[in-house]
Image (cartoon, coloured by chain):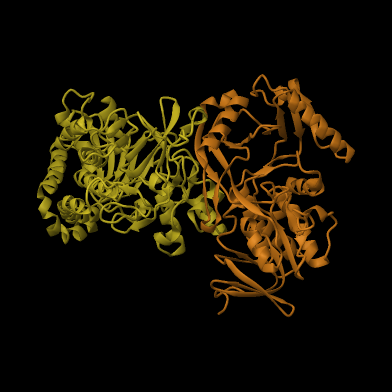
Chain colours: A orange, B yellow
Amino acid sequence: MNAIAGNRNKASVIIIGGGIQGCSTAYHLAKRGVDVLVLEKDRVARHASGVNAGGVRLLGRDIAEVPLSKVAMRRWQTLDEELDGDTGFRRRSLINIAADEADMQTLHTRQALMHQWGYHHETMIDQQELRERLPHVADYCVGGVVSETDGYAIPYKSTFAFRQAAARAGTEFVEGQQVQGVRRIGNSWLVETASGRYEAEYLVNCAGAWADQIAVMMGDNCPMTYSAPMLMITTRMPHFATPVVGAVSRPLSFKQFENGTVLIGGGAKGFADRAHNRTRLDYAKLAVGASNAVDFFPIMRTATVNRMWAGLEAYMPDNLPVISASVNSPNAFHAFGFSAHGFQLGPVIGEVMADLVTRGCSEFDLNPFRVDRFERKVL
Amino acid sequence: MTDSYDIAVIGAGPAGMSAAITASAAGARVVVLDDKPRAGGQIYRNVTCSPLSNTDLLGPDYTQGAELVAQFEACRAEKISAANVWHVGDNGEILFSQAGASASLTAREVVVSVGAMERPFPIPGWHLPGVMTAGGAQVMLKSDGLVQDDAVFAGSGPLLYLIVAQYLRLGVKVKALVDTTPKQNYLAAASLLPGALSHIDVLTKGIGLLNEIRRAGVPVYKYAEDLNVLGEQQAEGLRFTSKGVVHSLEAEHVFLHQGVIPNLNMTRAIGAEHAWNRDQLSWQPVINDWGQTSVAHIAVAGDGRGIIGADAAALSGQLVAWQQLARLGLISLSDAANHSQPLLQQLQRYQGLRRFIDRLYQPVDALRRPESAETMVCRCEEQTRGQLKAAFDQGARLPDELKGLTRCGMGPCQGRQCGHTVSELLAQWQGTEVEDVGYYRLRSPMRLINLTELARFQPHQQTHGVEVKS
């Protein structure tokens, strides 16, 4: 059996998964002249990378992720030019709202931690400044924290822009190729799908909510889970919020796009059926999200919800991704488990993975993201 | 009031009312949810409370609905009117908003009888103010007694002629009827005429309408093509070619109509399989003879299963009811079979008529798949054919991919106005079948819902514990 007619079946690197991490990795490798093939089980950007909330967020990152996130944020500012595409990125700042003094205390503690590490991109704001920046915020909100460089992008368009740039640099994308098995024969990786056989020197696992299955094929176990974070979006509203908005202790996040529609998230999860590529929504939890939105921004009382959806996303127990060489196989690498905040990291993860493949190391400290980090613990 | 039922019927048109009457009479606990204040559906809208003093002018097909509505009102089914059903789950969960709050109920079996909508009519200028569908004009007439003088009616199909005739009977001036039915349709349909003769009354009624319009002195332009709504900010007229001659008619109101297609957002969002009907050139749910979809416990009745017309819709409603009654164990399988048999035969007899009508009024390619780059395809997000083609050239192949790049289908009509056009255009550009292209992936809410109503949604109250008799 051969690969699909018209497609190559050999490359230096095979990337499994055509989400933003896979497309960005392909782009960075191809730009360095590496011969890359991306195998996507459905269609590029079909799952989390195409349907997430589009948050481009440096604010509130885990300390371990901050160096990566800061570099990624720099890249986003000029990503459209770099990719010669349209990611829809808009720098709008991100504010996490403090609803009460307890929230402010949480922010003070965080601030101290950030300063201790030498990070100064998160700035606390008082009630007056909060109201200046968000005139429609509810009166009881007492302050917040802002990161000026943050904003949003359009997820499908961003992933597509990486894909197009990668393709222009010579990457081949083969869609509808669900990997059924991988084997290490001599110095090669053999990859089998239902309708094709592929061969490469290096394998990169960017398989998102299915990445633990690919990891097992490559010889690495990891305690990944998957879920279905839910979103809803309104019809167009008069402009009332420029910054992207989150909340310190309540599950609320929303952003108003240029066209006036308001995307409401907040991390509430639906039900994930990954075997069938399906998610179910939990309407009671969406109702709580609606209630929070109205509570923080009374102007949203009259908003009309147009669409609701969820995407399949991978989570790790510590909510930190796996960015790692395989521990049990040579020439194999992982980038998955971003736990619903990987979109912003896309530009830098591609670069890190390209470094791992071509140079065997990265300038970043990747220890917190090792694939075997949970094996060292006695449970 | 309770919140769990044997059967939930969504939509109180001829199909839904008939299903409810049959099922409740046989002892099922039935609830019917409808978005209008009064039952009747589009066809029998306000038939029992018309703003018009003389409803006979609307024709016997309308007034005869009063009887069915009265039967329905008298039946034992619980009626929830003015309810906005925004979620129907494949598990039988139904969420709806009514009077500012959201509520839920569950049903063992669900009948989706949400009827049809008018086929989009994507010609240059169809998005301008002053352009409406002919059906929209009829809604204004039936609901509010509102009419527009000197309008141009354009398109094809029985409903178009009916509305023009209804206007004329009310003394409203009609500027012209621009008939887009192409000559070849008459020829192609002629061979199907014998199969339709069993419903000769329907055929004569159709011919009667056209004669009525001609006798009233309304100019009728036949075989019209190359339709363009004139005007920049607002409709100012219609330009078209008829029998080789270009005509430009001035009009502030242009009413367009080229047949109806099933309302699919509900069956799509439930996850039922759909197929492309090559005769009707529209998507429809895949069903068995009784109207059962690919999703267990979800059946469709009426025009939502593929266009069948009001009389056949009523039959299909009864049919669904008998099957669901058997599944609920309220009647035996053999009883269900006995009741179904004559209904199936009657439905079968409508097929010859249907094939004839479908062929005669089959809309031409140019009126379904816009040819000029400037023609609006997605009106909500203002995406033209040219913009969609550019996204296709970038690599978008599926409706959702086109949507991801251009926002087509993301607006408040939830893809209803562009979905069919997008499927057909993508198939044309790829040289493949519409079936291979598919449709937008839809999910709830099936209707727009107010955020405050959603916020007030209280999930189903579970009762815990087992009652123990002492």
Query: Given the current orientation, which residue lies at the most extreme front position?
Result: B470
Q: Return the x and y of residue B233 as percentages of the image width and height.
A: 44, 34
In this picture, is B25 found above or below B436?
above
Q: How many marks?
A: 0
Which residue is pictured at 18% across the width and 33% down the height?
B71
As drawn, is A174 to the left or to the right of B410? right
Task: Say which quarter of the image contains residue B12.
Answer: top left
As drawn, is B8 to the left or to the right of A159? left
As drawn, is A167 to the left or to the right of B15? right
Q: Nearer the viewer, residue A350 or B113?
A: B113
Residue A351 seen in the current view: yes
Q: Return the x and y of residue A310 as percentages of the image width and height.
A: 56, 46
Q: Nearer the viewer, residue B275 or A267?
A: A267
As drawn, is A349 to the left or to the right of B454? right
Q: Nearer the viewer, residue A361 or B180?
A: A361
Residue B128 seen in the current view: no
In this picture, is A128 found above or below B305?
above
Q: Return the x and y of residue B375 as percentages of the image width and height.
A: 44, 47
Q: Nearer the viewer, residue B285 or A83?
A: B285
Position of the C terminus of chain B, as image quadrant, is: top left
Position of the N terminus of chain B, as image quadrant, is: top left
Q: Return the x and y of residue B38 as percentages of the image width and height.
A: 28, 29
Task: Say which quarter of the image contains residue B251.
Answer: top left
